[in-house]
Image (spheres, grey):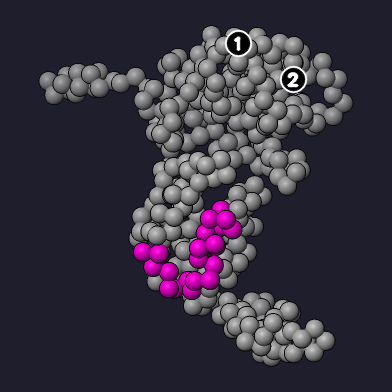
Amino acid sequence: MPVYKDEKHNTWRAVIRYTDWTGERKQTQKRGFPTQRDAKAWEREQLIKLQGDCNMLMGSFVDIYLDETNSKLKLNTVNSKEHIIRTKILPYFADKKLNEIKATDIIKWQNTVINKKDKNGKSYSPTYLKSIHNQMSAILNHAVKFYGLRENVARKAGSMGKKESDKEMLIWTQEEYEKFSYELMDKPVYYYAFELLYWCGIREGELIALTAADFDFEKCTLRINKSYQRINREDVITDPKTQKSIRTIKLTKTLCDEIKDYIDMLYITDENARIFPITKSGLNHNMLSASAKAGVKKIRIHDLRHSHVSMLIDLGFSAVDIANRMGHESIDITLRYAHMFPSRQNEMVEKLEMKRG
């Protein structure tokens, strides 16, 4: 595999020719190396990369990992993953050989990331730390599974952060919500948007993606089958968060009539056009403003989803019933909201005692 001197620019160029997995002959090259040694080092690393050898640099393996996994993911997930890799992993491991990364290296990296501050001087949240570690572990898992890496040292080192935040789960009672929504009566787009968020518990991305075609006003149902994302400064409609998220929600008659009147008011000619041409930041701004005017505690948009679950638990519905409405697995509902379900331990013991006779 040759390297060439570019006499005109006084730099070096490396060229690699290879056969890809389909049997097709290909060539790749890179110019602008200041020395022959640099050109040969790049050539050597590319050959190791093509051979799938765990002796390659972490930075090279990340290119392989992203190429082989990104096509299976949604664009917003890809962007989030690549941001974590680029800013939280590669600065520490890019030039380290994959098979030379030790568990102690992972521990030192974890301690560095845990102590790091963002631009506002705040430490990363436990849930974000967990996401960072999970991404590192996913890269090494891919190397173990497909490229013969001996072990996942990130798993050996142990995780950092936690899946759930220690923050108290905030919810609005119906009384608090009604005080809040009253302040939006003069903003119909936002008023009806929040009506759906509170009384249906849908995700904000699901809300913003809604079209008139998603409603069946005779059956009073709402079909959730897509989600809105703002990616690279463009509006993008994607599949929902999970397969379980695709669902049909029953609406109350009152809410059904409200939304029908709202859509009629829009004079929509295309039933596949979005009925809420707003952004997530617009929702958040109006929530903060109306909350302050109403004198109710400040919560997040996603907390309206928690509020809906809390209301359903108070009404006596099971985790399975609630999960089907929310687009979750029932085990997720059980674990996330276990503290809200009434304890039936005494009833259990009484029935067990009766069974024993």
Q: Which residue does the image show at 62% across and 21% down from the upper left?
A: 288
Q: Which residue is drawn at 81% across and 28% down?
A: 271
Q: In which quarter of the image is residue 325?
A: top right
Q: Does the magenta stretch include residue 93?
A: yes
Residue type, mark 1 in image: Ala
Residue 210 seen by the camera: no
Q: What residue type is labelled 2?
A: Val
Mark 1: give few (<14), some (14-19) or many (20+) Cα within 10 Å.
some
251 left or right, relative to 171: right
Q: Is mark 1 on a helix, strand or loop?
A: helix
Q: Does the magenta stretch include residue 331?
A: no
Give how far across and how far down residue 306 sits, in percent.
50, 25
**x then y, percent, for residue 42:** 62, 80
Q: Mark 2 sits on what residue?
A: 189
Front position in the image: 191 or 342: 191
**Residue 231 visible at all:** yes
Horizontal and vertical percent position of residue 280: 67, 32
Q: Residue at x 68, y 40 (%)?
A: 229
Q: Residue at the front extreme?
A: 121
Numbered circle sitting on residue 294: 1
Q: In which quarter of the image is the N terminus?
A: bottom right
